[in-house]
Amino acid sequence: MDNVPLSTIFKVKGRFQRSVHLERDFYTENALDGYILTVTAREMLSRVAATLENETASKAWSLTGPYGSGKSAFALFAAKLLGNPKAFTTEQALRLLKHGDPRLYERFTNTNGKGHSPSGFCSVLISGERASLPISLLQGLEQGLDIFGISSSSSLQRKIRKLLKTEANGTPPASEITALFESATHAIEKNGGRGLLLVIDELGKFLEYAAQHPTEGDVFVLQTLAEFATRSNETPLLLLTILHQAFEQYANKLAKSQQEEWGKVQGRFEDVAFVEPTEQVLRLIGSAIEITSEGQNGNFSFPTELELKPSQLNRDEFCELIRNCLPLHPIVTLVIDSIFRRFAQNERSLFAFLSASEPYGLQDFLSNQQYDRDAVPMFSIANLYDYLITNMGNRLYVSHNGKRWAEIESALDRLPDLSAMPAKLIKTIGILNIVGEVIPNLKASEQLLRYALDDNTEGFPHKFEEALAILKKRSIAIYRRYNKAYALWQGSDIDIEAKLREAERHIDTKNALATDLSRYLPTRPLVARRHLFETGTLRHFGVRYTDLENFDADMEKSLDDADGLVLYALPLNEYEVEQLIEKATKNDTGHREKILIAIPRTIGTLQDTVTQLASLRWVAENTPELEGDPVARDELSTQQSQAEKEALNRLTTIFGKGSKDTCTWYHKGQQVNIESQRARNAYLSEICDEIYDKTPILQNELINRRKISGAVTTARKKLIEGMLEKGDTENLGIKGHPPEMSIYRSLLSHTGIHREVEGMWGFHPPKGDDKNRIIYTWNTIEAFLETCESQRQPVEKLYEDLMAPPLGVRNGPLPILLCAVMHCYKTEIALYENGSFIPDWSMPVFERFLKAPQRFELKRFRVTGSRADMFARLLQMLKQSKGTEKPDLLTVVTPLIRFIAQLPKYTLATQALSDSTKNLRQVVLKAREPDELLFKQLPEAFGFSPIGTEVTTNSERISEFFQALQDALSELEQAYDHLLNWVEQLLIEVFRLTSTTEESRMELAKRAEPLLAITVETDLKGFLIHVCSGGHDFKSWLEAIATYLAKKPPSAWIDTDKAQFEINLSQLARKFKHFEAVFYEKRKHTETSAGESIRIGITRPKQPEQEQVVILPSTAEEQATEMERAIQKVFDEIDTDGDPEFRLAVLGRISQKLMQEFEKKNNLTS
């Protein structure tokens, strides 16, 4: 049958020529014809079975996978499988399941698994569209219930229709829609149904609509439905959504707050990646293509030395699968799924390519090629390139590999004949370079290129060699030595090959391989994932390369902040292997229990790979011409990147994929069984389980960290503030769901540390089943506090104990747990900062505590012996007693220290106190240890002996001590009031006031008020203003005057400030009296005549001060002017020097004599 169209030999089955539409296909009899139960589909069905077997399992899933990967077909199969057992399509689904997975079939049909009931599940199937999701849900529910047999006249159906009618008034509330689905499960149960299956296909369309119309496309309904699904049990709601891309991708254009809300919705679903492995894709393609018996006889061969088969298949299985995929070239079958997943996700699918009549597509190829049994025409990589460029065009250039596609087009533009072998070679190299990033073995080696382009014609070998030579000569393709493959090349003045040969002469080949690896391939830490999942604590292992020479030193090196170390040894020969094994089986190193050692039998070509990488680095660092040559620079960068990948692949082969015959692992001197990366990662968790077997289970990724974020730091502060201020309140008074609420629940609520006991909320030791494994941590803190009874201990030491094995508590929770224990024993624990006792645990103190715990210490006090007798008396004296049966040290000492500390600064500084009171003040202010203060320093301050723990202490002496203490405290309490009394008495004395307190204030203000109008001196005017102010009580008035005169408030005075106040008051009082005299003299004369008031004052040694206010009548103005001139003339004649001081002295003498005469005349002697 040669020379007939290929389309007569190869056909695509009808099922694969159209995509699945849930709502349409669910009601057809042939819905499952040709369906293949894939590995991924079986895994998803296993999750469904687990849900039916265990009511607590997840019931809301989100299937995410590329377009055309079979998600909708799976959803259709699942709906049929869970349907009415008597229905033809359900029986068909069960047969397919039994054939594909007998064990899974048993789980679904087992009566204990509850997979089926008389009527099965009611299916509500919704296909995505750009419309309101809530409305579509109601419409789908109405239709699904109707088909299931729930009468349209039922109250439930009427409620659904009523809610649909309200669409014009806005989107129905999510809560009401969810309530209807809940009612639907009850109705289904009454009708013999097992449950309700809700499938939302192409959810992305609804999400796109919701992003554009937030008020109409409320996605919150998904959250409420998922939450209901989770709690539904006997008649469950199973919720399945289908997406082509991750949920958050649909929200990337929304505001941050909306993105966070969508994130909460996504968090209610279990994400399932619906991506088939390569061998499954091959089976799907093979099942889609029908090959006649003639086609089966066609000549076909596959070179197994290319090593392209998936690891899950043997050679014969692989060859059979790719034969079934003819006429697709085997290389095309291996790359096509990756191509469509990465570059055509939302445009077309693999099966659209197989079945659609598109230019350069498979159907076009089948129609235009003739069958030849000896040389079957195959759809090649070059054909695939033509199809993609023609049908996808510019969409390829804007993809994340757009530059690579542009490079292919640019290389083709440099050829005169696009149909010739060089053009096919360019297309093949280009696509292999693109897919080779994710399919490592598909590299454009000469052998693979030859096979990909071989058309079985006689002249092919020559054409291929000639085409390859042309591309190399024109600098269109370049050979990369490190991976023995070709790449497209735009040409450059820099000969990279020559530069690499030069690098080989310069690099130091004597460097240790481990050193070079660490330099060129920085390691990443490995996480103990299972341990993290089970305990909530992330622990990581550092990774280090070593060799025989440095093995011992690397074993002893610090782990820094890592929890352990994976040490990869690199032996150069068999002798070094044996020596390394001998060292690894010793168990004499301090932290060997934290080290996992890997020793391979051989490292193969790793040394060569790293040397090539070193050469590329040398060229990059020693070729300044690269700065101006972007083509060479990009090529060198690409080669470096690929060389790094090659080295990593080699390391993975050496350490990660070998059996125990190729690599052996050691821990604590013993060989352990690790045969894969997964096994290695699992063993890391075993190490952590063993070392940190007492670690608390704190499932909170916000706080359970070494370093917490700024936002979590703020939340921790708020939580501790709540512990300090609202420890007696449920939830510490936290409202809503801020981050601190999450931390509170994980660390304090779920652990039982903060709980209600006898109607009172407080902090208590954890108890009960200890499912959070917190008791050991609490006991460790209590054991530390016991060591604090004999002497103060640094908080940092406690932190070290908690962070060390077997606990390994992280930094984030430490201060919260310690604060809880401190509150539990608050009356027994004293906190010190930089050696000073802190009586009040305020938030500012704890802010400093959080920033610098190394500055803080703790001490615990317990009361024994007769000392307890004095507590009640002290409590009563300090007014702290609340009838407590067990008075304690800190309950007494703290208010005493607080009382002294809160006294005015004057009281803390003045020496105008009795000696015993000053002694009391001094010992309290300098107190460092509460017990020493109370039982030794206080008694000694009053001349008594220290009070011991013996029960025979003289009660009479204790009474004398308390009397002295009470007298001293009273003196301290009254010292400031005495100061203000002194100020008041001084004012009364200086101004000769006749009354006291408020009356004296009114008397002085009445005298001062008239002087405000005639006073211009700043200091006196300010004094008058303060005297006349009426907005304060008497005490505040005194303080204001005292502050004005002494320039600082009396509460802050020292003893010398009293003398300064007295001087300043005396000076201002004198001025006050002078102006007062002027005012009253002027007022007296103003009543009879007009004139000018003049005050004259004379002070001479050993004589009383004289002053007088005189009036110069306006009627004597001319006479006064004439006398003034005559006196001035006398001065000018006698005092020719014109000395003003001399003239003032003479006038002073004359004024004194005249004043005496004036006083006699008016009988005004003082």
Image: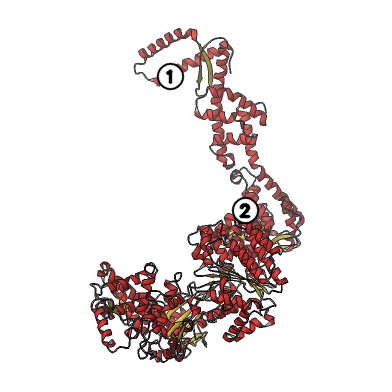
Q: Residues within 10 Å of mark 1 (few under 14, many from 20)?
A: few
- Residue 544 lies in quadrant: bottom left
- Amino acid type, residue under disc 2 in the picture: Val
Residue 907 position in % (x across, y down): 61, 44
Residue 150 position in % (x across, y down): 69, 68
Residue displayed at 58% across by 11% down: 1087
The earlier-in-sequence mark between 1 and 2 is 2
Instruction: Tell me if 945 is positioned left or right of 67 in this view.
Output: right
Reading the image, the residue beneath label 2 is 923
Q: Is residue 355 above or below residue 454?
A: above
Considering the numbered disc 1 on the image, is that residue within a helix, a strand or a loop?
A: helix
Residue toward you, 188 or 619 = 188
Residue toward you, 441 or 414 = 414
Residue toward you, 513 or 1053 = 513
Residue 60 position in % (x across, y down): 60, 70
Q: Which quarter of the rendering shows the C terminus?
A: top right
- Does residue 851 appear anywhere in the picture? no
Q: Is residue 642 above or below residue 1085?
A: below
Instruction: Tell me if 1008 is positioned left or right of 543 in this view.
Output: right
- The number of numbered discs placed on residues in the rendered structure image is 2
Estimate the spatial distance between the alpha carbons at disc 1 and disc 2, rounded to whole Å.
61 Å
- Residue 803 lies in quadrant: bottom right
Q: Which quarter of the rendering shows the N terminus?
A: bottom left
The answer to whether marks 1 and 2 mark residues whose Cβ atoms lie closer than 8 Å is no
Residue 935 position in % (x across, y down): 68, 58
Residue displayed at 49% across by 9% down: 1114
Q: Residues within 10 Å of mark 2 (few under 14, many from 20)?
A: some
Considering the numbered disc 2 on the image, is that residue within a helix, a strand or a loop?
A: helix
Reading the image, the residue beneath label 1 is 1144
